[in-house]
Amino acid sequence: MSKQVIQTANAPAAVGPYSQAIVAGGLVYTAGQIALVPGTTELAAGGIAEQTRQVMHNLKAILETAGSSLDQVVKVTVYLQDLNDFAAMNAVYAEFFTVAPPARSTIQAAKLPRAALVEIDCIATLTH
């Protein structure tokens, strides 16, 4: 099985030896995304809602570059710095998955890169 590396300037560049996403076997596997603003090394200003929104925009850009979309997401993993932020994260998350939301796991992580409040990765099917 071959794999294709996905890279877009519309999402934060990888800050280590990993790809923004990999396409293999008809699926897109994204790297975990934190709320970095594309083209910068800065987290989106604000709290959990603003960071979740930026993460979702980053994932959307990566998926679209790969030939997929948020509508094609089948599995999501959410990592929260503080599980008490669940309701606020969930409210923003629900704006992006309005019909047939994907399966999801949510966990509290001891620490996230750059002291981010949330990190999210996903698996999606290709649209073509």
Image (cartoon, helix red, strand yellow):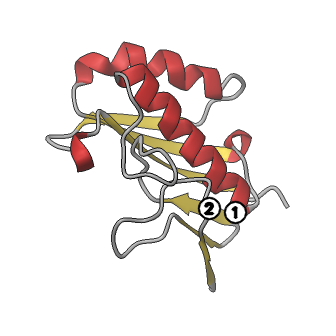
Q: Quadrant of residue 119?
A: top left
Element under disc 1: helix
Inspect the image, locate mark 2, and give the three-letter code of the amino acid beneath it.
Val
Q: Quadrant of residue 2?
A: bottom right
Q: Picture coordinates of residue 22 (x, y %)? A: 56, 70
Element under disc 2: strand
Say which residue label 1 marks. Answer: 66
25 left or right of 128? left
Q: Residue furthest front?
A: 40
Q: Residue furthest left?
A: 110
Q: Picture coordinates of residue 34 (x, y %)? A: 39, 45
In what quadrant of the picture does the N terminus appear? bottom right
Q: Residue furthest right?
A: 128
Say which residue label 2 marks. Answer: 28
Q: Which mark is residue 7?
A: none
Q: Front-most of 69 and 53?
A: 53
Q: Picture coordinates of residue 82 (x, y %)? A: 22, 26
Report the residue at 53% width, 25% height from top: 93
Inspect the image, locate mark 1, and give the three-letter code of the amino acid beneath it.
Ala
Q: CA distance from mark 1 to mark 2?
A: 7 Å
Image vertical order of residue 15 relative to residue 4, above or below: above
Mark toward the viewer: 1 or 2: 1
Dot 1 and dot 2 residues touching (CB under 8 Å): yes
